[in-house]
Amino acid sequence: MNTNEFISENLDTSNLKTVSFTSKAPSNIALVKYWGKEKVQIPKNTSISFTLNACFTLTTLKFTKNSEEDVLPKHFYKNVEVFFEGKKKEDFKPKIITFLERIEKFCPYLKQYKIEINSRNSFPHSSGIASSASGFAAIAHCIMQLEKELSQILNIKLNDELFVKKASFLARLGSGSASRSLEGEVVVWGSHDKINGSSDLFGVKFPFKLHENFKNYHDTILLVDKGEKQVSSTVGHNLMNNHPFAEQRFVQANENINKISKILQNGNLEQFINIVESEALILHAMMMTSNPYFILMKPNTLKIINEIWRFRKETKLPICFTLDAGANVHILFPEKDRKTINDFITNELIQYCQNKAYICDRIGFGANAIRSIL
Ligand code: PMV
């Protein structure tokens, strides 16, 4: 795999002493799941997701140029400070340092700066919603804003296509699913012979016309369990090595990409529901059949799923669920049925959420730069 196009050498930082960039990046919800990877951050199968809108991370990176004697190679640790919701977060640092070390080769100018990261999420931190996708996408997007500015000083034009491609490439090195949070409305990550331009190295916009049925598609997230994750995604992905059903799973996921690609174009919601729900249950089945095994669903997760199935049978409305690596339930439905389904959710489902908490989200358009707030 050729990663040379992502190496930015010889950018001169001498004229940019102190500068801040802010980016806003959304979360995403996978329809065909990524579960299993090779080193470093190469997926075992292709995945596809809806980019979200209301669940996002807002991040400012403040770059302060090191003094001359500080410029020589130095461990990132001393040069990085991380703040989350205004508070210094030492425990967030190791993951961010690993990320910066992974991307250093591609962004050598970073070593010349002290970096202060200030971040906050639109959703509660302890909601059980993973913030690594939106978090790393936002950091990567800020870094690309710096790279663009440094390029401009040298009269090098960094075009929008390369900007977003490299942002996704960098974000992937923080968290695989983050590579799918730079663009909207539907993003594919992982090379697939039926998806033009797809790559293991970065996410690409779904290259076909999305059927009207999926415009404004809703994702209402029921917060069943706000606790810390029982299993980190790194551990979870690793459990797919030597998993007895892994090879079959990777083949199946790639077949499902083929199927869902057609469905997203033809708008067949019945088939959409079938693949999306099946993918959610397979993800959890993989966890339940790994060694060590674990169950991330809670009793209320199953109650909600059963209620959704009952309601769907009674009303024939195209409502379905998907799950992340946790107990929360994402309820997906089209804009045209919003009213009836919202009533169903508020009247019958939120009783199963912790403190009746839920988030109304919908399909969105990806990351963008925000005027600096520092
Ligand atoms: O990006 P990671 O390493 O946190 O993995 C995320 C995996 C799932 O959320 C469970 C599935 C997916 O494709 O997003």
Image (cartoon, helix red, strand yellow):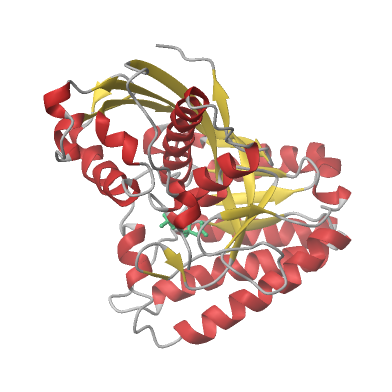
Residue 107: percent from left, percent from top: 37, 42
The answer, for residue 223, to whether it is visible in the render is: yes
Rendered residue at 36%/17% (across/down):
15
Residue 27 vs residue 342, the one in the foreground: 27
Rendered residue at 50%/60% (across/down):
201
Say left or right for 23 vs 267: left
Q: How many circles with numbers are drawn on the protein?
A: 0
Q: Is residue 356 placed above or below 327 in the rendered structure?
A: above
Residue 12: percent from left, percent from top: 37, 28
Residue farthest to the top? 374
The answer, for residue 328, to whether it is visible in the render is: no
Q: Quadrant of the C terminus?
A: top left
Residue 277 vs residue 121, the one in the foreground: 121
Q: Is residue 220 placed above or below 233 in the rendered structure?
A: above
Rendered residue at 48%/85% (across/down):
247
Say left or right for 77 vs 160: left
Residue 238: percent from left, percent from top: 33, 71
Residue 234: percent from left, percent from top: 32, 61
Q: Is residue 374 placed above or below 315 in the rendered structure?
A: above
Residue farthest to the left? 69
Residue 182: which quarter of the image? top right
